Image: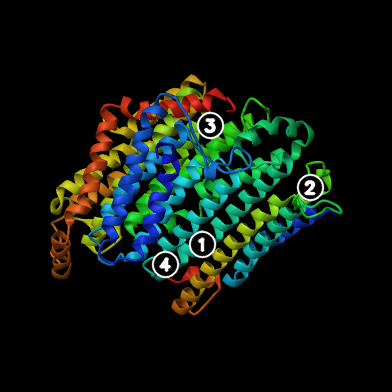
Amino acid sequence: MTPINISLLVFMIGLYGVMSKNNLIKKIMGLTIMNGSIVLFFISIGYREAGLAPILEKGTTGDIPTTILVDPLPQALMLTAIVIGISITALALALIVRIYAKYKTLDIQELSKEQ
Amino acid sequence: MAIHIPILIIISPLLAAFLVLLTRKYKIILATTSIIASIVFISTLSSRILSGDKITYHLGGWQGPLGISLVIDGLSFFFSSIVLGLGLLVIIYSIPERRYSRTYYFLLLISLSSMIGIIYTADIFNMYVFYELLSLVVYLLIAYNMKGMALRASFNYLIMGGVGLSFFLLGIGFLYAMTGTLYIYHIAEQLPAAFNSSTRMVIMSFVLIATGMGIKIAVFPLHGWLPDAHSMAPSPVSALLSGVTVKIGIYCLIRMIYSVFSTETFSIISSSHTILIVLGVVTLLFGASMALVQTDLKRLLAYSTINQIGIIFIGLGIGTELGLTGALFHVLNHAIMKGTLFFCAGIMIAEAGTRDVQGLSGFGRQQPAITFAFIIASLGMIGIPPTNGFVSKWLICLAAVEAGYTILVVIILMASAITAAYYFRVIQVLFIGPPKQSSVLIYEGEQMIHGGNFFKSLPIYILAAGCLLLGLIPALGISMVKPAVSLLLSHVIP
């Protein structure tokens, strides 16, 4: 099991949660799991076995073997993706609060019956 | 100054969005001015773009794969002019409504700015970030009036959109894993080599990205969120969503199919054209038949959007020069027509006090000018000359015959007949019965007329005139589409 396979598995678990759960909060949890799996996926792309942090110190020249450095770009991307994920979750929870105040239920089957 | 124009087009609405939050009096002036400024900026570039040139701008002076670049070519110019044009009209249409506060204009400006960002950026992750920003703002705009149905529609869209963009991001991850770059044109260069070594990953990334965008475009099996979201949003927002936001997904898909996964490099993607045609046909017929049974005016218009997306997909799927011209021209035409229809629907619903089609009786005598615009746009949707919808449908039908898919012409004509059935049903109701005499509503109506009916009807007249103009002189629209089509067909990796 490579980390990439695991992250795809987690992605599928999240997708299952979004699709099959009736509770709105659980759907959001599924979405968060999907987001987390993508973070895992990107980080494992950039990971190198026994890699160093890609920081060049002052005075070093360009003859460092690049293969043992961890790819920093996916990590930077994932910082952005985590922030986006949080804002989506926050918005969704705010919507859920409003929906609950109106309908007094969080079950999507019950909600679809309401007019 | 002149070299910084691409970023100024994005910055201008973005900056105004935050300034709008600070002021109460000047919010409308600020919003309108920023969009007009963007339009002025973009029109200074128009002559260069229309002659086939391409403008690249490196953010912060960082070149190519290291930094993020903005690229304005024929395709992005075409889409961004639609966004800005309809965006300006949406803001003008919103002016008389008192209930739209500063937040509304803030969200509207952010959405316009992020749409232009998606269109211009050449960095695929940046495209995702802008798309997520756009979606976030759109969820808020749909739920703007805080009614129960709107909240539910917004939540449904959030779930679907969230899943769709997760797919998109995972697809980007696969692309990055294979090519080690996020710059679209570098990915396109690296992909043929990656395809030979890891075929499955290329196919996987294509499928993930296409599915993600399919959710955003509302192609048939993934359309579930669209009717609710587009019908529950405030009317100007509906016009923006139907007219422009859906097209952003189409833009991303076109970019992916033609710029990243280009046809000549590998054979598997060429079968995606067949998939596009099949999806288009199913979406077309489904949207048309579902629109036929709707009683809610805005839901009907929302399903009609699904119907027209089907036509655009068929045009893209045929993929010849004529087909692409038709499809892109239909993107422009649909933005104009659906804008008109949703703007008219907003006025009709406000006057009649009901969203039910049957409740609209007598509107035709009350406001003949608005009704006339509604009829012109409906004729465009059906595809009757001399409206613009006819020209683009005609081009797509010609392309279908040329490419040997005669059956598609039959299907498009059949769907047009269904389209005619549901639009004529609405038009017929508009003229039945006497004008409504309900006292409360008349009072409200009068207030609306004094409070600036001019601003509400101006965008409608402009768009309806556009329908007729593009129908009578289609060369105007086609000259806009031409650079985009030649860009797509050239297959040159810049």
- Mark 4 is on which residue type? Met
What is the chain identity of the residue bearing mark 1? B
What is the chain identity of the residue bearing mark 3? B
From the image, tell me which residue sits under label 4.
B149
Colouring scheme, one of rainbow, by chain, secondary structure, one colour: rainbow
Expressed as whole percent of the image width and height from the top left, the position of residue B135 reads 49, 56
What is the chain identity of the residue bearing mark 4? B
**Residue at 37%, 51% in the rendered image:** B240
Expressed as whole percent of the image width and height from the top left, the position of residue B169 reads 63, 50
From the image, tell me which residue sits under label 2.
A60
- Looking at the image, tell me whether mark 4 or mark 1 is earlier in sequence order: 4
Q: Is residue A8 left or right of residue B101?
A: right
Q: Are both tags, 4 and 3, on one chain?
A: yes
Q: Are marks 2 and 3 in contact (CB under 8 Å)?
A: no
**Residue at 80%, 49% in the rendered image:** A69
Q: Are marks 4 and 2 in contact (CB under 8 Å)?
A: no
Q: CA distance from mark 2 to mark 1?
A: 54 Å
From the image, tell me which residue sits under label 3.
B317
* Residue B156, label in figure: 1
- Mark 3 is on which residue type? Gly
Expressed as whole percent of the image width and height from the top left, the position of residue B71 reads 50, 37
